Structures are given as structure tokens and as C-alpha cells.
Image (tube, rainbow, N blue to C red):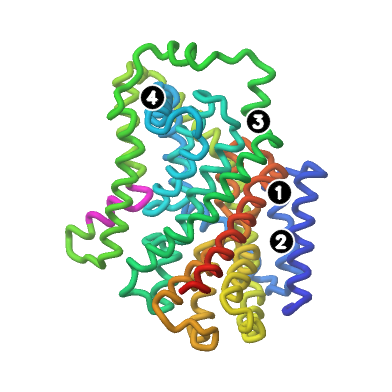
Amino acid sequence: MTGIPLILVFVVAIVAMILLISKLKVHPFLAILAVSLVLAIVAGLPLTQIPGIIGSGFASTFTSIGIVIILGAFIGAVLERTGAALKLADLVIRLVGRRHPALAMELMGWVVSIPVFCDSGFVILDPIRKALVRRTGTSSVAMTVCLSCGLYVAHVFIPPTPGPLAAAQALGMESNLLLLIGIGVLCSVFPLVSGYLFARYIGSRVRSADELEADSSEVLSYAELKASFGKLPSAVSALAPLVVPILLMALSSIVTLAQGSGIVADICLFCGSPIIALGVGTVLAVMQLFAAGKGKDFYVLTNDTLRTVGPILFVTAAGGVLGKVIASSDLVVFLTEHAATMERLGIFFPFLLAAVLKTAQGSSTVAITTTAGIVAPLMPVLGFTTPVDAALLVVAIGAGAMTVSHANDSYFWVVTNFGRLSVSEGYRTQTLMTGIIGLAAILEAFLLSLVF
């Protein structure tokens, strides 16, 4: 199957999946796998290849993010157990004040995600988010949306994250990366502002499981909670498990950007890979745990972490299956063959193409790289001839590549599960937010294209 019928089948499949999960209360893991299997058969994929496609999609998630989620969640659990998360919350409040913690969370995510994948960044920063919620009384949902927004905007706009970097290379921007970084920073304004305003709006209308549980149980005040830990870790000790991995990944990104080679560059790339960097953070967290006199909790904490992240990993992997099924169908081929019909849309053409690819298969990086490959030979036709034009084109592709995040996107499951949101609440928050900031980003790119 190909063409418009395949697109319609895809839409029906997504609607069916949402109904199974939200209305019929089928577990997301089973619902996504069932929809993926039926979609693969209806789309006409060879029956003998479907089991391999499902297995490949499932395994790829564990390869790319599984260990990162486990290690990041463990670091977060240690920070909470030792009181380091409360210490970090106090540091943030001291820097930005109590009035705008959600904005502080958004900007923190935006900065961290320049060298770090948004999935990893959310897991790393989530303990600070939760502590700030307790510290300030800000809506947990608003803080979740702000953190997700800040991380996502930098992830799709600013090199050296792989998507924008690959698009820069495809569009001939390798020698103008500083210009691309500047345009990416400039085009972050509209989506960050719109994401923050949406977070404030939706935070008053959706409540996470954490907030509902707090209403139904006796919860310690922040001062009582802080006192229960006795002496909190020092600022350096509290920061180390988070900052050291970020610095290692940033160093790796700098080496990649500079195209370094040799043994020193190899060591930097090794230490800066997310798994190794978070492994270092885990070692520092364990040292903090023992220094706080809570080494006896090490085994139990590890076991609890694995029990907590297990459902997240399996649902995320099921989303990877859905994305793999779509990618194995003829949908991408159909869009590529009919790209010429959209050329008259100008800068909105790469945005729409990337948005369709993103919504269909889930990965922002795949959507960016695929769209860049399709658009590259069409740049003269679209009227993009200068380096600034090419930079705006990369931003337009990035804007489309975050429109929208839903059940076939691993980031959707990271945000909803760590933010304690149901699937339907995830669609009302994460999915709607990514649609809003994507539209805000392409609007800003369009306005800048009129100026430059």
C-alpha cells in the first residue's frame, strides 16, 4: 500500500491507539504493539519480514536510550535520597528568585540540551524539577512542560546535536556553523516564549499523579522535608553527578564540531558518550550516597530504580516498534516522490515535510536528516541561495521535526512517565506543546526570512 490510502491508514492507526489506551484502558505497551502489528500487515509489509521489523524497532530503543534512562533515573534517586536535589533547588532559587521557577527550568533545559540529547537532559534534570516543585509550590505539570520545551528547542535548532549538524552538512553549512548556532539561538525566542505561556496555561488545568497523591496524603512541608535529611550535601557534591556528565558530553560535542582526531579526541568522544558520561555520574552519585552515611540503601535503591524505569523502557520500546513499522512502509518514499508539488510553499515546505515525517515515524533526528536530504537539491528552486537562507532552512526543518511529539516518540514517554502524566494528559501537554512551539518557530523563521 502507498499514497493517500497509506496516510489515511496511518491516521486511523494513531486514533485507534489513542482510543485503546485512553477509553478502553488497554496498557500502552500492548496497545502500541497491537496497532503496530496490524498497521504493518495492512500497509503491505512482507509477512516474513514483520517479526524482524518489530524486533529491530524494539531493540533500537534499548540501544539508543535504555541504559541512559536507567543510569539517569538512578542518579536522580540518589539525589532525592541524600537531599542533594533539595540543595540544588535552593541554589536555583537563590540565583533566579522564587517568582519564576518554571522559566528558570525552561532556560536550564535549553542550555543543557545544546550539547546533550533532550531525552538524557530530561532524565538528568528531573530531580531538580521535582525539588523545585516542592520548594516553590509551582504546578508540577507547568514545570514538566517548561523543562521539556527548553530541552526540545535546543535539541532541534542548535548544533552540535546530531540533527541540526547533519542538516547543516546536507545543506552546505559545514563552514558556517557559528552562523547556524546564532540563527538557532535567535529563532529559539518565539518557541521558548510560547512554550512558557502554554505551560502556565495548561499547568492550571492538568494535574499530575504526584499532585493528586499529595492531595490525598499527609505531605511534609518543604522545611520539614529538608530537616528530615539533617545536614544536606555541599553544593559541589550535589552538583557533581549532574554537571560532570553534562561537561563530558559537551566536551565530546566540541571535539565532534572541531572534527578532532587522535588519541585525546578518542578519549573525549568515549567519555562524552551518554552511557559513559552518565556512568561517571552514577559513580559520583554512589560516592555521595556513602558519604551521606546511606550506603546501606544502595541495593534497595538500585532495585527500586529498575522497578520504576522498567515500564518506561518497555512502553518506549513499543513506540520504537511503531516508528520502525512506519519507516519500513512506503510513506517516506511517497512523500519524497511528491515533494515537488510542495515547492511553491517556500520556507513552509521543509517545515511541513519534516512535520509529516516526525509525526509519522517519531524521531526528530530522522525527520531532520531525511528532510534535509530531500530539500538540498531544491534549494535554488525554493530561493535559498545565501548562508543565512540555508541557516533559516535548517531552523524551518527543525521546527517541523518537533511538530508533534506523540506515542511513537521516545521523548514523549520519557516526559510523560517522569512527569507522572497519563497518556491522555501527555497528549494534552507534551503533544499540544510541541505543536504550539513548532508553529511559533516556523513563524519566527518566516519573519526573519522577510528581513534577511
**First in sequence: mark 4 vs mark 1:** 1
Identify the element where label 3 is drawn: helix
Mark 2: few/some/many CA within 10 Å (<14, 14-19, 20+): some
Q: Measure the C-alpha gap from mark 1 to mark 3.
A: 22 Å
Q: Residue furthest right?
A: 24
Estimate the spatial distance between the alpha carbons at disc 2 and disc 4, rounded to whole Å: 47 Å
Residue highlighted by disc 1? 30
Mark 4, secondary structure of its residue: helix
At 52% from the left edge and 25% from the top edge, which residue is drawn?
136
Badges 4 and 1: C-beta atoms under 8 Å apart?
Answer: no
| Quadrant in the picture for residue 281 | top left
Q: Are marks 2 and 4 in contact (CB under 8 Å)?
A: no
* Secondary element type, mark 2: helix
Q: Position of residue 54 (x, y in %)?
A: 62, 61
Q: CA distance from mark 2 to mark 1?
A: 11 Å
Spatial distance from mark 4 to mark 1, Cα to Cα?
A: 40 Å
Q: Earlier in the sequence, mark 3 or mark 2?
A: 2
Query: Dot 1: within a 10 Å radius of its alpha carbon, few (fewer than 14), some, or many (20 or more) residues?
Result: some
Q: CB atoms at circles 1 and 3 under 8 Å apart?
A: no
Q: Nearer the viewer, residue 26 or 452?
A: 452
The quadrant holding residue 352 is bottom right
Q: Which mark is residue 209?
A: 3
N-term-proximal mark, 1 vs 3: 1
Q: Which residue is mark 4?
A: 87
Query: Which range is magenta?
Result: 267-276
Amino acid type, callout 3: Ala
Residue drawn at x 49%, y 11% is 224
Q: Which mark is residue 37?
A: 2
- In this view of the protein, which residue sits in the foreground, 149 or 300? 149
Query: Does the CB distance between marks 3 and 2 fall below 8 Å?
Result: no
Does the magenta segment cover residue 271? yes
